[in-house]
Image (cartoon, rainbow, N blue to C red):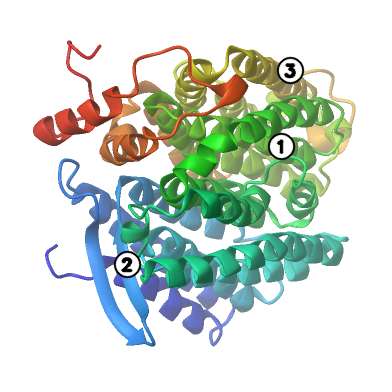
């Protein structure tokens, strides 16, 4: 792999395919998009297999000066690697999900998804501050078009709300980036992650980035665009929105807020924990009374992402690892749940929960997949959700037992609304003849759901394969945060001493692993 620009190739494949889709017929566009996304998936697997877990933090780097100090600079660490793999894994499934349901302007639709793939990979691979911003903001455009053109009856309102919410916060982030580049004299993200900004300025910089990332997550109370966007978006749009786009907010916290502004991050731990606790309880209660399946899953996404934000700001190894696994798990599980909704929506053209019931009788294979993803969503041991929630809560407990109790309560509420949804859809009396006559999964739908089911079980049974590439980078971030501890009620009072982070990295470097030695345990 030495000298081969694999990241640039992964950006180039969907770009070329998107242009081709604009000039071929509907079937040609479908096959072009599928082949291109499968090719990028293969490149993603190659990227993962060739990533040196014990090697340098930044790998597969490319850099080219363009103009006026602006650089085309790409590179990944283990955290970016796993999010890129998640993106390229979901994209072929999204194309398959749209194979029959999208019948108008197919070429433009497939091109929009391919551009979306390019921009998602770019966000996670960018190593220049302004290149990141371009990819981050440009991702709004194809999703805005996907919702606004191919969405539901109220798609215009939902697309404008999505665009304006996410754009407003990012304007403040751009202003902060300009100040940072002027202050530090560089736009190189790895350099900025080690740069010590003045503590007084960190507060304002942190708030500027927070305005963007909080909306993108989305955090309560700036989450109201998400249910509308999910309800109006086509099935594949909801899958990629929940599966990858929401993760850009969490990635932003990991890449910018925490390493670049550690003192400010510690100062605002109480704010993050408070908003996370409110989000988990409030959105879970709202989800309990929903009649629309998509809206219920959308509110559950807000609750799950709240555990991510709490884990990220736990300022310890377990919390950071748990937050990353939660992002990966949520990307798979929420995407699968939206696919399950799409499967029956394509047959009956309604998302009203009461229109279904007893589907396990006439759609038993569908009911099995739906049950697996429901159990993963509520954290059943053996699924990815359990690993994510357990690690996150372990980390959060070291910061605040009160926050842990509230977040655990939210998880219990999550079990309530997800099991309630499953019971009403899959069990009970078949009151509607049209729902009772729906056929079970076809081959295309099997191909969509089976890989996600396998990945959910793989992550639940052997999470180390997903944690290993990220562990050394998370340990480096933890060491960067070791100089700043949360203050006030969120001060760390339990758990091992902070010096463990530095020892952890030294051990990881010597052994190529992230496990502590016996003396440190």
Q: Which residue is mark 1?
A: 297
**What residue lies at 48% left-to-right and 41% top-to-bottom?**
263
Decide which of tag 1 and tag 2 comes sooner along the chain.
2
- SS label for mark 2: strand
Q: Is residue 143 visible?
A: no
- SS label for mark 3: helix
Of the 4 image quadrants, the one containing the N terminus is: bottom left
Decide which of tag 2 and tag 3 comes sooner along the chain.
2
- Residue 254 image offset from top left, x and y in percent: 45, 45
**What residue lies at 34% left-to-right and 50% top-to-bottom?**
81
**What residue lies at 53% left-to-right and 84% top-to-bottom?**
24
- Residue 191 image offset from top left, x and y in percent: 31, 60
Q: CA distance from mark 3 to mark 1?
A: 13 Å
**What residue lies at 64% left-to-right and 27% top-to-bottom?**
367
Q: Which residue is mark 2?
A: 74
Of the 4 image quadrants, the one containing the C terminus is: top left
Q: Tell me if label 3 and label 1 are in contact, CB under 8 Å.
A: no
Residue 510 is left or right of residue 291, and the answer is left
In the figure, 457 relative to 39: above or below?
above
- SS label for mark 1: helix
In the figure, 231 relative to 72: above or below?
above
- Residue 206 image offset from top left, x and y in percent: 56, 51
Q: Quadrant of residue 173?
A: bottom right
Q: Which residue is mark 3?
A: 416
Q: CA distance from mark 1 to mark 2?
A: 34 Å
């Amino acid at each position: 792999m030495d000298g081969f620009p694999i990241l640039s190739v992964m950006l180039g494949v969907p770009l070329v395919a998107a242009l081709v889709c604009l000039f071929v017929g509907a079937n040609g566009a479908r096959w072009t998009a599928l082949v291109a996304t499968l090719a990028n998936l293969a490149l993603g697997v190659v990227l993962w297999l060739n990533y040196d877990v014990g090697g340098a933090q930044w790998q597969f780097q490319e850099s080219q000066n363009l103009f006026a100090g602006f650089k085309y600079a790409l590179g990944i660490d283990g955290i970016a690697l796993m999010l890129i793999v998640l993106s390229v894994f979901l994209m072929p499934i999204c194309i398959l999900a749209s194979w029959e349901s999208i019948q108008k302007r197919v070429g433009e639709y497939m091109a929009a998804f391919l551009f979306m793939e390019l921009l998602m990979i770019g966000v996670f691979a960018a190593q220049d501050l302004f290149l990141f911003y371009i990819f981050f903001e440009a991702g709004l455009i194809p999703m805005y078009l996907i919702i606004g053109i191919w969405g539901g009856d109220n798609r215009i309102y939902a697309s404008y709300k999505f665009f304006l919410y996410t754009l407003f916060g990012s304007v403040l982030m751009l202003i902060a980036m300009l100040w940072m580049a002027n202050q530090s004299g560089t736009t190189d993200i790895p350099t900025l992650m080690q740069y010590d900004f003045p503590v007084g300025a960190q507060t304002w910089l942190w708030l500027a980035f927070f305005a963007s990332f909080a909306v993108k997550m989305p955090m309560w109370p700036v989450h109201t665009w998400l249910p509308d966007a999910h309800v109006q978006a086509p099935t594949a749009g909801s899958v990629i929105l929940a599966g990858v786009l929401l993760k850009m907010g969490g990635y932003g916290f990991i890449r910018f807020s925490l390493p670049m502004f550690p003192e400010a991050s510690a100062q605002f731990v109480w704010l993050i924990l408070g908003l996370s606790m409110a989000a988990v309880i409030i959105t879970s209660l709202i989800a309990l009374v929903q009649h629309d399946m998509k809206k219920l899953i959308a509110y559950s996404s807000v609750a799950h992402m709240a555990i991510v934000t709490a884990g990220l700001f736990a300022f310890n190894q377990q919390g950071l690892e748990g937050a990353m696994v939660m992002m990966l798990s949520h990307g798979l599980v929420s995407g699968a749940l939206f696919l399950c909704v799409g499967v029956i929506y394509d047959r009956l053209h309604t998302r009203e929960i009461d229109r279904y019931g007893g589907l396990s009788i006439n759609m038993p294979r569908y009911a099995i997949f739906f049950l697996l993803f429901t159990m993963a969503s509520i954290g059943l041991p053996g699924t990815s959700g359990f690993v994510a929630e357990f690690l996150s809560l372990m980390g959060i407990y070291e910061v605040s037992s009160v926050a842990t109790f509230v977040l655990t309560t939210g998880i219990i509420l999550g079990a309530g609304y997800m099991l309630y949804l499953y019971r009403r859809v899959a069990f009970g009396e078949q009151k509607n003849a049209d729902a009772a006559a729906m056929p079970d999964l076809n081959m295309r739908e099997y191909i969509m759901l089976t890989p996600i089911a396998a990945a959910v079980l793989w992550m639940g049974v052997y999470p180390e394969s997903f944690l290993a590439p990220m562990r050394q980078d998370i340990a480096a971030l933890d060491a960067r945060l070791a100089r700043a501890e949360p203050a006030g009620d969120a001060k760390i009072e339990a758990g091992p001493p902070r010096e463990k982070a530095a020892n952890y990295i030294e051990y990881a470097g010597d052994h190529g692993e992230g496990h502590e030695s016996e003396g440190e345990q």
